[in-house]
Amino acid sequence: MSTKPAGNMFWGCITICVLALALQVYSSQPCDTSSSSCSSSSSSSSSSCVPGIHIVRDSPPNETLPACVTKLLVQGEVRTLWSGTFAGSLLLERVEFIGTSTATAEVDAFQSSPNLKILEISGTQIESLPEGIFGNLAELVLLYLTDNKLQSVGAELFRGLGRLRELRLERNRITSVSPGALKDLGQLQDLDLSQNALKDFPPDLFAELSGLQRLRASGNQLASIPQDIWSGRLTNLQLIDMQCNRITDLDTPASPHLKLQQLFLGYNQLRELPGDLSTHFPTLAKLGLHRNIISTLPDGLFGKLTELEWLDISENQIASLTQGSFEGLGKLTELNLGGNQIESLSDDVFKHLPSLQCLNLSQNKLSSLNGALLGEFGNWRVLLHGNSWHCDCELKELISSAQKNYTIVCEHPVEVRNQSLSELGKEVLCPTTTSAPSPPASASSPPAAPTASTPSPPASAPSPPASAQSPPASAPSPPASAQSPAVSASSPARSSPPTQSADSKTTSDSNAPSDSNAPSDPNASSPISNDSLAPPPQEQIKESRGAASHNGNKKMESEESEGDDLNWSSLSKVILPIIVPLLVLLFLFVLSRVYTRTRGYTVRPLDPRLKPVKMVDDENVKLLFVHDLPETIPAPQPLPAPLSSPN
């Protein structure tokens, strides 16, 4: 390989390394207030206070927070929430602790921030919070305590949060919630307890949450849905998410939930559904029952769910469907039946679904379809892959006439297994079963002459031998026949000529003039000698063939090795100058991330449902990526007027 690509690669690596280091030094350089570059901004900030975001990177803070600060982002090595951290900040409305090393908090940490509306403590090492820590936050509207190590919720932890509308406690290690822990949250609308270790709830835990609209408790170990949810006091409930639990029975509420629109009970252990399901949830728009062990769908089960638009019953044990299984679902647009054990479908099973747009029948045991059912599909988006399709001529014609690209992979017959039906031609699936009859042989056509390799037909057996017809002519022939054994015995290494056959001998005898009175000379020699008819020795043939093949293999190996060398050299000239700089850049990127994380300049977004947004601090020193929390807090529905910002 030439040295020119290596030189280019070397200088490319050097250039990328220098640029990466320069960028890292520039981006991670903190603002030094003593330097001339920051003197103007420091003097301007000291002379006039501009409301904005203040950043705290140590614990306790080295300076008192400005009185005009409204948003506070805490990051870095903040191990304790001290009582004097927010002293003097009466206008503080939003505080975020994200990705810090906070492990403990004092009970009066937020005592001096009565106007706080948004508080987030996420991604920390906190295992417990003292009860009453939020007691002075009467204006708090959003409280996010996600991705921590909280193990329990005390009875007085949320005391005094009468205006709280959203409480999120997901992705902790909560095993128990004390009775009465939510009694003061009368205006709570959104409660998230997902991905904890809860096995049950205390009685009447949700009894006072009359304004609750969304309840999420997925990813726990709950065996049943709390009875106080169905008590009739949660009249504003719109969403219930109890997925990934251990629920075995679905109890119906005492009175219908007239506002419930979404019910998700997937990944549980439900065996059957109550017959009055549609009576108690008449306003449901989405129903998720996937990954349970439901085996039957009784007729009329969904009869009164006239508002249902999305139904997921996938990955259950349903083996058959009837005409009334989906009766009454006039607004249903998406139906998921994948991953069941359905073997066949009747023609009218989907006739009560006029608004259907997407139908999933994948991963079942379907083997065939009929024309009437394909006609019902119409313009639907239908998924049919993963079934036990028996590909034949009839199925091919039905799918071709539908003029839609259905994904059908054959299971039977064995000859076309794992092949797509659309790629198989009719000559493969529709073979001819009968062959055309052969025309009868005419009487005038002469029979085929027997060859040396095929036996003579039995019709020639009655013909008398030639020796019987002319005894005098065949009398002198024994001496000639007696001579052939002697010749073959004298040359055992030579073989008789393969071209000499009985047919050729008979032909030559018939063409020669026959004279019965002419005596035959037994000592007369043949004009063709035996030596000239003998084939060459087999050893010489084998040696010549072996030498030729050896030379050919040598030539092919040399050509292949030369081609491999050329291909590798050409590829290395192109690939190596690209791969090596990329690897170096990746290493520098990882190194820079470790460096900046130890300096405490990065904040990782923990909640996938919240989008990161760029925010700039007072001195425009650094861009920070924080959660996309709302800047303005909309008024809750029970309240007559929106919240007003403090003067």
Image (tube, helix red, strand yellow):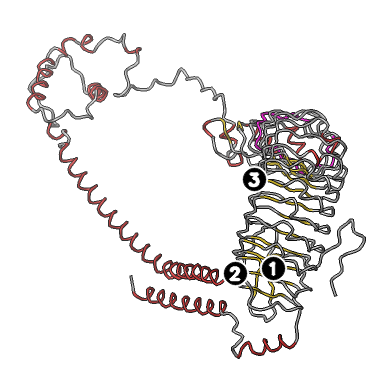
Q: Amino acid at mark 1?
A: Ser
Residue 83, disc: 1
State the image coordinates of residue 636 (x, y, percent, origin top left).
Answer: 86, 58
Which residue has dot 2 on it? 76
Q: Which residues are magenta?
A: 328-348
State which quarter of the image contains the C terminus. Answer: bottom right
Which residue is depicted at the point 81% across and 38% down?
Answer: 353
Q: Is residue 646 magenta?
A: no
Q: Amino acid at mark 2?
A: Gly
**Residue 488 in the image: above or below residue 637:** above
Q: Alpha-carbon neighbours of circle 2 within 10 Å: few (<14), some, or many (≥20)?
A: many
**Would residue 291 appear left or right of 573 to someone viewing this image?**
right
**Who is closer to the viewer here, 448 or 398?**
398
Q: Quadrant of residue 529?
A: top left
- Secondary structure of the residue carrying tag 3 is loop
**Would residue 482 appear left or right of 187 to someone viewing this image?**
left
Which residue is depicted at the point 71% across and 28% down?
Answer: 320
- Secondary structure of the residue carrying tag 1 is loop
Q: CA distance from mark 2 to mark 1?
A: 18 Å
Q: CA distance from mark 2 to mark 3?
A: 29 Å
Looking at the image, tell me whether mark 1 or mark 3 is earlier in sequence order: 1
- Secondary structure of the residue carrying tag 2 is loop
Which residue has dot 3 on it? 197
Q: How many marks?
A: 3
Q: Amino acid at mark 3?
A: Ala
Q: Alpha-carbon neighbours of circle 3 within 10 Å: few (<14), some, or many (≥20)?
A: some
Q: CA distance from mark 1 to mark 3?
A: 31 Å
**Residue 294 in the image: above or below residue 473:** below
